[in-house]
Image: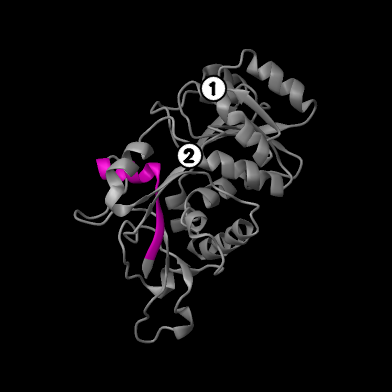
Amino acid sequence: MRVLASPIDPVDLLVVAGHYPVLPAFQTVPGLEGVGRVEAVGEGVDPSWLDSLTLLPMRACPWATWAIIPQSKSLRLPGDLDPIQACMLRLNPPSALDLIAGLAPGSWLIQSPGAGAVGQCIIQLAKMHGLHTISLIRRESRRGRLEDLGADAVFHQDTKGLRRQVRALIGGAHLTRAIDGSGGPLVDRMASCLDPGGEVLCYGAASRQPAQLSVRNSVFNEISLRGYWLYRENATHPQAEAGRLSALAAEMQAQRLTLEVAGVFSLKDWPAAFALARSGERCGRVILQP
């Protein structure tokens, strides 16, 4: 396959630094996800795959010009799908879909960071599933982006009286789930907004701090804290992955699901790409293109 595009995900930065729980063998070309076009097929492979826009398998070494991959682990995509958008399909959209699973239409959820890649996917997918979202942000400049995506409410993470304002907003409706990728004390702030017996789902820690949950919320309000990891979810339910990705690709093709792009760089400009990817003030993913 000729690689067309691949994002620099936060996971990639952790892998390159040697800090991720699952590391590839030494001297492997980095990159977690990407998309390419099939230019040659091996013996026994259906020739109709030729020229197909194809989602690369996880960890297919996409920060390169070419990749040789097994057809059995590839996913053919709609030919008119934007490769820049398609290259970000495998990681954040399915994570967002899993994180909102099980909530009944009309339900509310609260999440942080609302302006992150997963957070933006949650807002869009929740809207499709009839759910209402409350998103917390670190920068006021991100409010407009989330409202344009369909967020029902956006609060700054340091809002005074967050619980009071959230409960007034939802009226008598139930709020049973908080979704967290921030870590730190923000976890407890979101937990305080939940109904007794609610749940916090943690998928990351952008603050690099452990998730904090007070005795008041964990014991007296019976709020539970549970982790989510897409890697384990895919390993546990491998048969569901292709169907889920195909459905998400259709939403992306219809432009009901879009992911934010901070910049597009050629492989030879990787130092500048990495500098932007590591910047705390960037908005969206940095994309590498051969």
> Would you identify the image quadrant in which residue 169 lies?
top right
Above or below — where is 150 with respect to 168? below
Residue farthest to the right?
172
Image: magenta residue range: 3-17
| Percent coordinates x, y for residue 31 in the rendering | 34, 53
Residue 23 seen in the figure: no
Q: Which residue is mark 1?
A: 188
> Would you identify the image quadrant in which residue 251 lies?
bottom right
Residue 4 seen in the figure: yes
> Would you identify the image quadrant in which residue 207 lies?
top left
Tell whether 60 sits left or right of 181. Answer: left
Membership of 173 in magenta stretch: no
Mark linked to residue 203: 2
Residues at discs 2 and 1 in contact (Cβ within 8 Å): no
- Specify few, some or many for label 2: CA neighbours under 10 Å numbering under 14, 14-19, or 20 or more: many
Q: Which type of secondary structure does the marked residue at label 2 adopt?
A: loop
| Percent coordinates x, y for residue 264 in the rendering | 41, 49
Residue under the image location 31 percent in, 41 percent down: 272
Sequence-wise first label, 2 or 1: 1
Above or below — where is 211 with respect to 80? above
| Percent coordinates x, y for residue 156 in the rendering | 59, 22
Residue farthest to the left?
27
Above or below — where is 172 with respect to 20? above
| Percent coordinates x, y for residue 15 in the rendering | 30, 45
Q: Amino acid at mark 1?
A: Asp
Q: Quadrant of the C terminus?
A: bottom left
Q: Depth check: 142 or 24 in front?
A: 142
Above or below — where is 47 with respect to 36? below
Tell whether 157 sits left or right of 35. Answer: right
Q: Amino acid at mark 2?
A: Tyr
Residue under the image location 62 percent in, 13 percent down: 160
Residue farthest to the top?
160
